Amino acid sequence: MAIHHFQPTHYHTALGAHEPVLHIESGDTVFTTTVDNAGYDATDTQVTPGGNPQTGPFYIESAEPGDTLTVHFDRILPNRKIGRTATVIAPNVLDPGYVAAEMPAGGRAEWHVDVEKWTATLLSPQTQLGAFTLPLEPMVGCFGVAPPRGQAISTATSSTHGGNMDYRGFQEGVTVYLPVFVAGALFHLGDGHAVQGDGEIVGTGVEISFDVQFTVNVIKGKSINWPRAENADYILTAGNARPLAQAVQHATTELVRWLGELGLKKRAAHILLGQAVQYDMGNVFDPAYTMVCKVKKSILREVGVWE
């Protein structure tokens, strides 16, 4: 269980079978950095073209197709003081009549990010919001492994391999589970947000660069279909597709399967989710939407399938 410090020198805007930047073992921890969605680093200098550039990929030595890779986000910390957002809600999230007749002009907003006060404060443009301030909720917008069948999939979208899911629940302390499709898994991550509302409905969070620490583990012979995760309170699954209904189907089916693996028979799992399931909306801006299906661990403890 080694600790690695890695400083990236180049980035990728597609998740695929790129040359690994570092070979690590199951159980290892990595300290690294990410740039923001436009390729700006901790000094607010553009060091690579935009498009959700990814740090990595990291090759995990024992990972093989059919395994599951777990990644624990040990630390996710903004490493500069300026974040940026878009300012107009995506047309596909609004009624067509509103888009045609009432849509405001676009543009960018700048935010002051203060990791000591743990806040993001609107600096510009000047609006009636004034110095609008929100607590920080740092999250990783885009991460995943190399997809199957030799594909290289744009960081603008997502699928079974992960990708640009923009789910605000992918925060520090969360463990994510990803299916392994290629030798070494080839884990990528980037697109940090200091804050983001559900759905990333303006197409951005408060985009910023990060200092990141993560720890990987390989579950041998364990095959999953879609990204999974757990935090202190929930287990959850992510479905990525368009239309949104298909993303709901993927996420719900994956959670039913997970409950079955935990020991719940199908009828019991269906009854439980029917009254206890919760849904969170991930990305509804990009080519594939993300829906998260989750259930409380406390409920699973009550029925005897979680310790």
Image (cartoon, rainbow, N blue to C red):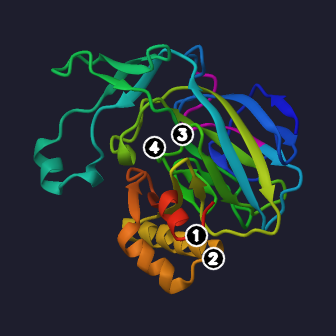
Q: Residue drawn 60% across and 63% down?
A: 306
> Circle 4 is placed at which residue position?
168
Residue type at tag 1: Gly
Q: Do the residues labelled 1 and 4 touch (CB within 8 Å)?
A: no
> Circle 3 is placed at which residue position?
171
- The answer to which of marks 2 and 4 sits earlier in the sequence is 4
Q: Are marks 3 and 2 in contact (CB under 8 Å)?
A: no
**In the image, residue 51 lies in the stretch drawn in magenta:** yes
Instruction: Provide the major secondary structure of the magenta segment.
Output: loop
Q: Which residue lies furthest to the bottom in this view?
A: 267
Badge 1: residue crowd in 10 Å (few <14, some 14–19, many ≥20): few
> Circle 1 is placed at which residue position?
304
Q: Do the residues labelled 3 and 1 touch (CB within 8 Å)?
A: no
Hey, which quadrant is residue 261 in on the image? bottom right
Could you give the CA–CA distance between mark 2 and mark 1, rounded to whole angstroms? 9 Å
Is residue 21 visible to the viewer in this orientation of the structure? yes
Q: Are marks 4 and 3 in contact (CB under 8 Å)?
A: yes
Rendered position, 178 above or below 42: below
SS of the residue under disc 3: loop
Residue type at tag 3: Gln
> Circle 2 is placed at which residue position?
263
Is residue 243 visible to the viewer in this orientation of the structure? no
Quadrant of the drawing holding the N terminus: top right
Magenta stretch bounds: 46-57
Q: Residue drawn 76% across and 46% down?
A: 216
Badge 3: residue crowd in 10 Å (few <14, some 14–19, many ≥20): many
Q: In x, y percent, where is residue 200?
A: 38, 44
Could you give the CA–CA distance between mark 4 and mark 3, rounded to whole angstroms? 7 Å
